[in-house]
């Protein structure tokens, strides 16, 4: 059970960072 929770937590962190990167990209587009 703990392993599943840790796995889900790490996935959530990755998803959150992915969203943050996309938001930053939208705020500062490269063009």
Image (cartoon, rainbow, N blue to C red):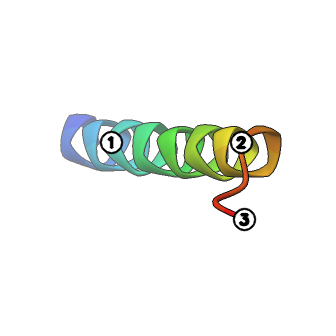
Residue 7: where, in percent of width, then height? 29, 49
Residue at 67% across, 53% down: 22
Mark number displayed over residue 10: 1
Looking at the image, the residue that sits furthest to the right is 27
* Location of residue 29 by image quarter: bottom right
Residue at the disc numbered 2: 28
- Nearer-N-terminus badge (1/2): 1
Left or right, residue 10 beside residue 2: right
Label 1 CA crowd tier, 10 Å (few <14, some 14–19, many 20+): few
**Is label 1 or label 3 in front?**
3
Residue at 27% across, 37% down: 6
Residue at 44% across, 37% down: 13
Mark number displayed over residue 31: 3
Left or right, residue 22 beside residue 9: right
Residue 19, placed above or below residue 6? below
Q: Observer-nearest residue: 25 or 8? A: 25
């Amino acid at each position: 059970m703990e392993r599943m929770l840790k796995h889900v937590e790490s996935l959530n962190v990755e998803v959150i960072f992915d969203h943050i990167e996309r938001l930053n990209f939208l705020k500062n587009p490269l063009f």
